[in-house]
Image: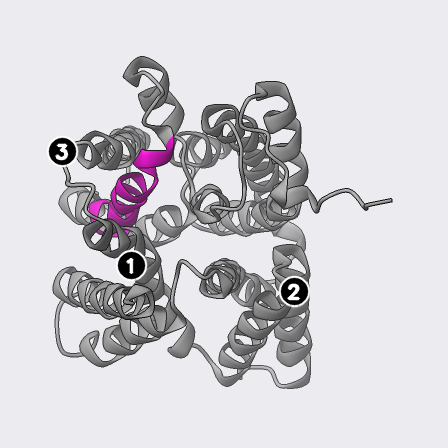
Amino acid sequence: MSDQDIWIAIAMMAVLLVIMRILGFALSRLISDNKQIRAFLELLPACALAATIVPVAIAGTPVQIGAAVLCALIAWFTRNILLTLSIGLSVMLIGSFLAPGL
Amino acid sequence: MSSPPPVASRDFSQDRLATAYFGLRKSFGFSIGIFIFGGLFGATASSANISFAQAMAMSGFLLAGSVQFPTLALFADPMPFAAIAMVTVLVASRFTLMGVALEPRFRKIPRWQLWPAVSVITDPIWVMLSDKTVKVEPLAFLLAVSAQFILAWMLGTALGYHGATMLDAELRQVLAFGGTLFLVGLISILARSSATPLSALAVAGGIAIVLDPLLPKALSLPLATLIGASVGAAMIARRQAP
């Protein structure tokens, strides 16, 4: 792949991302302020994130799945993303050392 | 003598400077996570044979690990521009949904200030602003936190790119899963908030697991999202019913 292709791809993604980020704010003013519709709309990004990440986490190796479950529990109880990530990565590193390939 | 209120319940909505300072403190833990995540991206970019400037441009202009990792894996000769655009739109569609959800909080801000500011919105900022107990001036909060996140993301990318040679391939593969762990943590924090029923997230995730092997991602992702959000909205309506 050429350097020029890479730069074009990066520029294209940057433009698309700016449009996607602004689009929601622009469209929202056209949507009704009905409470139930708003509740539904507020849940959409969280559900999109769950639908994107959960299958990826489940498709990992046993060590990766274990680390993901542990991260979910730590974040749930502490709401501390730093602690969550530190323990999750430590589990992954120890797992790869003790059971390579798992 | 009464004790001071907890930090999150204070009202900073009239003071931009206090909001910015509060935002920087509140998001510091996220910034460390973002720094690590950025390091993982830098290491991955280094092994994908793109230049340092290109890796930094990706991090600086995209600010979205969930888009950067899968699209980087698509870089090939000839460059599959259509596939890269599709993955970008599909994965970034949640940023549009975040905008729809957060817009009422930003309604008083004129568009010429709002649109440039929200072009750097990220998952952790949305998670923090979704918490309605956080009373801040939203634009100052967004700009201060974004500046910290951009710095952490770029610094992480730079160090990861140059430090990658010190890590062996297996270790890099292990660390690459760190991005997923970061987002799993974010989902879990969201699920703790009363505004996001756990059942909605569980349904969306569960349906995505079932549908992913059966349907293309462009269909399974929106279907799982819509069903999960419908279940969640129904739960909230039932909770609020007299």
Image quarter hosting the N terminus of chain B: top right
Label 3 element class: loop
Residue B94 on the magenta segment: yes
When asked about the image quadrant of residue B57, the answer is: top left
Q: Amino acid at mark 1?
A: Ala
Chain at tag 3? A
N-term-proximal mark, 1 vs 2: 1
**Residue at position x 27%, y 67% in the image:** B241
Foreground disc of the pair 1, 3: 3
Is residue A93 positioned above or below B218 on the image? below
Where's the C terminus of chain B, which quadrant? bottom left
Q: Kindly identify which chain the residue marked by label 2 belongs to.
A: A
Residue found at x 20% / y 41% = A33
3D distance between C-alphas at marks 1 and 2: 23 Å
Q: Which residue is mark 3?
A: A30
Q: Which of the 4 image quarters holds residue B147?
A: top right
- Residue A76 screen position, x and y as percent: 56, 68
Q: Position of residue B136 (x, y in %)?
A: 53, 32
CA gap, disc 1 and disc 3: 22 Å
Of the residues shown, which amino acid type is indicated by label 3? Leu
Residue A48 numbered tag = 1
Say whether disc 3 or disc 2 marks the residue closer to the N-terminus.
3
Residue A78 badge: 2
Q: How many marks?
A: 3
Marks 3 and 2 close (CB-CB < 8 Å): no
Q: Secondary structure at mark 1?
A: helix
Label 1 neighbour load within 10 Å: few <14, some 14-19, many 20+ = many
Residue at the right extreme, as displayed: B1
Q: CA distance from mark 3 to mark 2?
A: 38 Å
Residue B75 visible in the picture: no
Have a look at marks 1 and 3 and say if they share a chain.
yes
